[in-house]
Amino acid sequence: MLTDPFPRVNLSHKPTPLERLDNLSDDFQTNIWIKRDDCTGLAFGGNKSRQLEYYIGHAKSKGADTLLTTGAVQSNHVRMTVAAARKMNMDVEVQLEHRVERDQPEYHRSGNPFLVKLMGAKIHYYPVGEDESGADQAMIDRAEVLRAEGKNPYVIPLSNIRSPYGALGYVEAAEETLQQLQILQVTPKRFFVATGSASTHAGFLLGLRASNCSIPVQGVCVRREGKSQKERVLAKIQSVVEIMELDINIESDDVICDDRFLAPGYGQPNPPTRAAIEKLARREGILLDPTYSGKAFAAVLDALESGEFGSDDHIVFLHTGGTPSLFAYPELVDQEESGF
Ligand SMILES: *Cc1c(COP(=O)(O)O)cnc(C)c1O
């Protein structure tokens, strides 16, 4: 594996399944595959467990005993960091940011924050939502306090202040997926993936290209508009290339950041996202989330509906998880319909 030189801990069920969506493939007369990274297993699963394997590998190599991280109230990354800390027998403190304007009590009580409390993390609140470096700084300040108390804390930041060890998890996932595709004798026309902090997108794209695979990866923006997301993905790729000491150049045109399904913003679903969540739930019994995978799958449906793929073509959707946050968005179903 390309990532063999880096320390890693085991947190995920791997390889995750790569399955054909038979009903939807029939509906659209093409071949739609799903890479089930919602099934990584750690406390409801999702893409963050692959990333945390390398972050915590690095943290352990530094003798860390306490993890700190920050995220939105419904952050999957925060939930899975807490689960990973518990599994690794580490202390954990998390910071929840006021990033999404939502009045529903479920947003603050159900889904991910419920699970964070259940697993017993110490929780801090951060009153701002769009201040990535400020949020990281608050955690770094907290780490200093813990250090003075004799702890050995490790901060997993949101911004690019630490080397992007998390992206290594998706370099590995790209290699894993290519092996599965080879066994299936399938060569997809395109991969689709949600792109947020960009560790998944950058790692996956780099893992493909470093394996001499040139299949396009359509990143679907969930946090920032396309232009700034593209800069972010490119910067992350550059940092990963550096730590891996790869001799490879990813062209700017190779980084696709589709922001058509972002509005009205992070953590706020739109009609195509709701339709995508409903479609996959009702045709395949597979659950998406309204912040990430639902938006990415809206882009898949859009490409299918515009007839971009024929009966001999194959595409792969990378399901990054996030399903606990469904319970924070009760408006996704008609509460009156069933009478309870
Ligand atoms: C964090 C997250 C993403 C985005 O991954 P990044 O590596 O941050 O770009 C996508 N889907 C889900 C469910 C997530 O929790």
Image (spheres, rainbow, N blue to C red):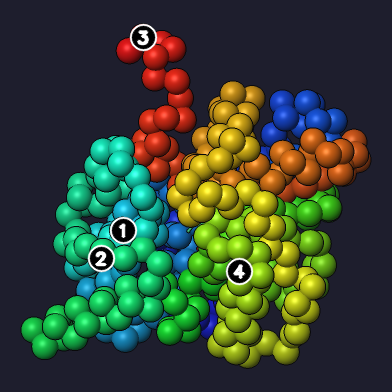
Query: In this rendering, would 164 be left or right of 131?
Result: right
Whether 208 is drawn above or below 339: the answer is below
What residue type is disc 1 on?
A: His
- Whether tag 2 and tag 1 are in contact, CB under 8 A, the answer is yes
Q: Position of residue 240 (x, y in %)?
A: 58, 81
Q: Which residue is at a point 30% across and 41% down the rendered structure image?
A: 103
- Whether tag 4 and tag 2 are in contact, CB under 8 A, the answer is no
Residue picked out by circle 3: 339
Camera-nearest residue between 274 and 251: 274
Q: Which residue is at a point 40% across and 36% down the rendered structure image?
A: 329
Q: Position of residue 332 (x, y in %)?
A: 46, 30
Q: Which residue is at a point 26% across and 38% down the rendered structure image?
A: 105
The image quarter in which residue 171 lies: bottom right
Q: Is mark 4 within 8 Å of ligand 1?
A: no
Label at residue 33:
none
- Whether tag 4 and tag 1 are in contact, CB under 8 A, the answer is no
What residue type is disc 2 on?
A: Tyr
Camera-nearest residue between 126 and 197: 126
Crowd tier of the residue under label 3, counting other residues whose Cα lies within 10 Å: few below 14, some 14–19, many 20 or above: few
Crowd tier of the residue under label 4, counting other residues whose Cα lies within 10 Å: few below 14, some 14–19, many 20 or above: many
Residue picked out by circle 1: 98
Q: Secondary structure at mark 1?
A: loop
What residue type is disc 3 on?
A: Gly
Measure the alpha-carbon separation of dots 4 and 1.
21 Å
Q: Nearer the viewer, mark 3 or mark 1?
A: 1
Camera-nearest residue between 9 and 22: 22
Q: Secondary structure at mark 3?
A: loop
What residue type is disc 4 on?
A: Gln
On-image quarter of the C terminus: top left
- Mark toward the start of the polypeptide (2 vs 3): 2
